[in-house]
Amino acid sequence: MKESRHNSSILAFQQKRGKDSVAFFLPFLGPDMTVLDIGCGPGTITAALASVVANVIGLDLEPKAIEAAKQLARGCERANLSFIEADMTALPFDSDTVDAVFFHAVLYHQSQEVLTRTLAEARRVLKPGGLLATRDADAGGNVLYPESQGLCTALDLWQRWYEHADPEAPRFGRRQASVLRAHGFVPIWSGASYVNHSEDAFARNETVADARRSLLGLGSELVTKGLAEDAEIQAALAAWDCWGSDPDSVYFRCRCECVARKTDQLDTSGRPGV
């Protein structure tokens, strides 16, 4: 019984996060639209979209993510919700067939080559005038308390990881409109919101668990690449445990948001046509 209550709490938590993540895009969507959620992960965001459009398809390259998403879909019992395993740089859809494309926390950690190919594919499958929405991180907007040395080290470790490939990656969020414009889209709305990782004890526990998984997953590679020492990783882990036990701790993670429209054509420079 205890495990069942725990699982239901996690599901409710994930469903709320899914709804919060798409809130900015909902005013632009209609009941007759087909939407792709690219890089859908376990599908909670895709499921939130399914409540307002005719058809939504989540896709991800990771088989385990798609299996989890399909399990979620079976529980939702929505006929307009489906998931497929696919590569975002080679979408299995005909050109000009989709009304809207959504990317959540997907684009900021891609190489320039993959980013270009991904946005080109999104543009290809979108109908003329179709919509593309992005919601991505920007480290410059995060709010953290208390700012212990260990927590600052933890955030710095993540920044080192992303910056070693692209120094601008941690601040991708603020550049979304510019990036989309350069790839054949016209931004029509920009904004930002926060993910509250500390709204209650459950949220703080989930945040600490996620932070530990991330740091332990990246730790050996950070050390191997000479980007960190093991002592720093251990200090960061201990700091997150301490943060999680403080009932007054807060962590608000900034998410920048942008909605753009597909233009009719690209000129030879790759910029939107007139």
Image (spheres, rainbow, N blue to C red):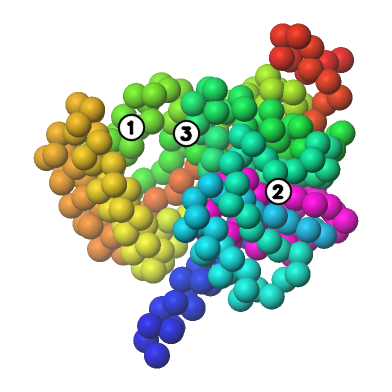
**For residue 126, which quarter of the picture?**
top right
Q: Magenta stretch: residue 49 in it?
A: yes
Mark 3 is surrounded, within 10 Å at the Cα level, by few (under 14), some (14 to 19) or many (20 or more) other residues, namely many
Whether residue 38 appears in this view of the structure is yes
Q: Residue at x 42, y 22 (%)?
A: 166
| Residue 238 sits above or below residue 192 on the image | below
- The span picked out in magenta is 25-52
Left or right? Give the position of 155 relative to 116: left
> Which residue does the numbered mark 3 point to in the structure image?
109
Q: Nearer the viewer, residue 71 or 194?
A: 71
Q: Position of residue 184 (x, y in %)?
A: 74, 23
| Discs 2, 1 touching: Cβ within 8 Å | no
Lateral position of residue 21 relative to residue 81, left or right:
left
> Which amino acid, by three-letter code, is at mark 3?
His
Residue wearing tag 1: 161
Asked if residue 205 is among those painted magenta in the image, a careful observer would answer no
Camera-side mark, 2 or 1: 2
What amino acid is found at the position of numbered circle 1 in the picture?
A: Trp
Report the residue at 44% width, 77% height from top.
7
SS assignment at label 1: helix
Residue 36 circle label: 2
Disc 3 and disc 2: Cα gap in Å? 20 Å
User: How many residues crowd around disc 2 within 10 Å: few (fewer than 14), some, or many (20 or more)?
Assistant: many
Mark 3 against mark 2, which lies toward the viewer?
Answer: 2
Is the residue under label 1 in contact with that under label 3 (CB below 8 Å)?
no
- Alpha-carbon distance for marks 2 and 1? 29 Å
